[in-house]
């Protein structure tokens, strides 16, 4: 059920968001004259994997399901993680390096797979593009809107394939309801989409830790990279950086998947205004992001999108089944019906006529469930990895091209900015500027410490 990007609906939508913004269309990658263009149908693409813990390991599992690649290098700032990955996924032929910069000049590397902390994504992707490498970059794309835009510009300037790990764009269930059937064909005009992330981390959260010397196996200075110098803390790395606003946020980590699904389903580009509220209300840990947050996005088309981030209460925030399990990741509320979408099913519940309305049938109740071989094909990350490999050969835009990922990730950054300035912000997506609070535009970019800097 996996579909190529060049289907009419997907192509038109990508052109709308990418070509109109940057002046590049589908042919931009197809004219590439580097080695990547002449990878033969029987040649294996040669990939280096950077960042091997947690999501990095998941990506290695997904990518190695393909027979079309050869792993030529492993890279991680943690020597123990590097050794474990080499033992599990290597065959002894791979280069083992702790500094990603050593990969850019390697002639046996066609592309990089980046599962590094978010504050590294922009620099590593842009430098890879400049070095003529294609990139699979994990989500969220970047830690600021300015970084994300530069990543798009680098991909276009150097004609690189940049796939971002918002993997549901490669999932059969979403392709069916969003592309093949069309969501609004099923449930009428959608005016509200609701989503969120809940996890009860009360009372101690990720804990508190005192600064210490870093372990001998971690190059802490290289982990920090462009971020301000600080002492090592065990509740920052390898995964807990997602609760520190210097490196990530949970609305970016979790929300970007759902924002992308909403934009895709409703053919939206970007909101025109955003308002977020919240704070650290209940969880007593070292985090620098909220444990409770609610964000609302308004689109010029006349739609609202709401995202709730609750980490002191984990019960579902949307409709549930008889076992109190949530019916979907996202709830789309249409004039004819409501649709709940999940990774292996979607469900449509018909609307009933309300006050003063004619009593007539609206949408039909429907449950579509992937089963059997279709269920086996629902490993969206593996499909996403294969799509990246395929596009390295064809030079087509991948399913989650960097432009699409940038637009979806920007929604999370706008919510964080609104929360920081404690005001509703008005957003001009063409110029990518905040129009009603000029000083808030200073928050659109990330500050890099020397000697790190982003250049095209």
Image (cartoon, rainbow, N blue to C red):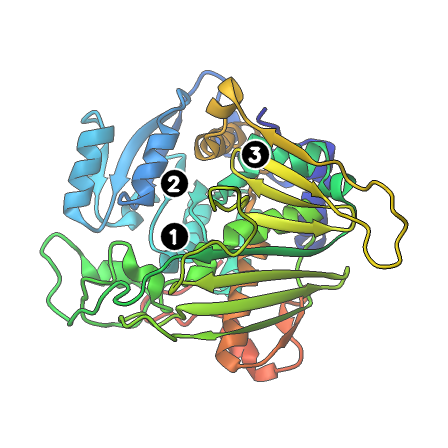
Q: Is residue 55 left or right of residue 404?
A: left
Report the residue at 22% width, 51% height from top.
Answer: 77
Marks 3 and 1, how far apart at CA: 36 Å
Are the residues flagged by discs 3 and 1 in contact, CB closer than 8 Å? no
Relative to 350, say whether 368 is above or below. above
Q: For residue 345, which numbered disc appears in the image? A: 3
Give the position of the N terminus as an image quadrant.
Answer: top right
Residue 213 drawn at (x, y percent):
10, 66
Vertical relation: 82 (above or below) 405? above
* Pointer 3 or 1: first along the chain: 1
Choose between 258 and 131: the one closer to the eye. Answer: 258
Based on the displayed image, in which of its 4 quarters is residue 423 positioned? bottom right
Q: Looking at the image, is mark 3 or mark 1 nearer the viewer?
A: 3
Which element carries disc 2, helix, strand or loop?
strand
Q: Earlier in the sequence, mark 2 or mark 1?
A: 2
Cα gap from disc 2 to disc 1, whole angstroms: 9 Å
Residue 286 location, quadrant: bottom left
Secondary-structure class at tag 1: helix
- Give the SS element for disc 3: strand
Residue topped by disc 1:
124
Evaluate if marks 2 and 1 touch, with contact meaning CB atoms under 8 Å apart.
yes
Image location (x, y in percent) of residue 293: 48, 69
- Residue at horizontal 46 percent and vertical 42 percent from the top: 323
Alpha-carbon distance for marks 2 and 3? 32 Å
- Mark found first going from the N terminus, 2 or 3: 2
Q: Please identify, in this view, whether the residue under mark 2 or under mark 3 is nearer the observer.
A: 3
Quickly name the residue at label 2. Answer: 112
Tell me if residue 278 can be seen. Answer: yes
């Amino acid at each position: 059920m996996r579909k190529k990007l060049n289907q009419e609906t997907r192509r038109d939508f990508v052109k709308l968001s990418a070509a109109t913004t940057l002046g590049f269309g589908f042919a931009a990658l197809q004219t590439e004259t580097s080695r990547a263009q002449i990878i033969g149908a029987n040649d294996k693409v040669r990939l280096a994997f950077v960042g091997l813990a947690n999501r990095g390991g998941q990506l290695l599992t997904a990518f190695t399901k393909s027979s079309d690649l050869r792993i030529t290098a492993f890279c991680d700032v943690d020597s123990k993680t590097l050794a474990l990955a080499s033992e599990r996924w290597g065959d002894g032929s791979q280069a083992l390096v702790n500094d990603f910069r050593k990969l850019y000049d390697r002639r046996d590397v066609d592309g990089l797979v980046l599962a590094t902390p978010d504050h590294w994504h922009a620099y590593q992707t842009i430098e890879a593009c400049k070095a003529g490498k294609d990139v699979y970059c994990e989500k969220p794309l970047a830690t600021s809107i300015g970084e994300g835009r530069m990543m798009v510009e680098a991909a276009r300037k150097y004609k690189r394939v940049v796939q971002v790990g918002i993997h549901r764009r490669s999932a059969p269930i979403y392709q069916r309801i969003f592309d093949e059937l069309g969501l609004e064909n099923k449930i009428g005009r959608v005016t509200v989409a609701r989503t969120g992330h809940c996890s009860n981390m009360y009372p101690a959260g990720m804990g508190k830790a005192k600064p210490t010397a870093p372990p001998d196996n971690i190059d802490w200075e290289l982990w920090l990279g462009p971020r301000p110098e600080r002492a090592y803390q065990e509740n920052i790395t390898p995964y807990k950086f997602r609760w520190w606003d210097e490196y990530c946020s949970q609305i970016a980590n979790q929300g970007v998947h759902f924002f992308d699904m909403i934009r895709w389903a409703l053919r939206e580009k970007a909101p025109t205004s955003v308002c977020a509220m919240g704070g650290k209300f209940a969880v007593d840990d070292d985090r620098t992001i909220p444990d409770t947050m609610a964000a609302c996005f308004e689109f010029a088309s006349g739609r609202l999108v709401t995202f709730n981030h609750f980490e002191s209460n984990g019960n579902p925030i949307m409709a549930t089944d008889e076992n109190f399990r949530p019916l979907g990741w996202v709830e789309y509320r249409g004039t004819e019906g409501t649709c709940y979408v999940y990774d292996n099913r979607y469900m449509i519940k018909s609307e009933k006529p309300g006050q003063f309305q004619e009593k007539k049938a609206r949408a039909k109740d429907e449950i579509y469930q992937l089963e059997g071989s279709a269920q086996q094909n629902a490993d969206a990350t593996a499909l996403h990895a294969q799509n990246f490999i395929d596009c390295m050969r064809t030079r087509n835009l991948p399913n989650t091209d960097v432009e699409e990922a940038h637009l979806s990730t920007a929604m999370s950054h706008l919510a964080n900015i609104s929360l920081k300035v404690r005001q509703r912000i008005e957003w001009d997506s063409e110029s990518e500027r905040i129009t009603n609070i000029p000083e808030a535009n200073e928050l659109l970019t990330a500050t890099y410490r020397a000697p790190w800097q982003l250049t095209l």
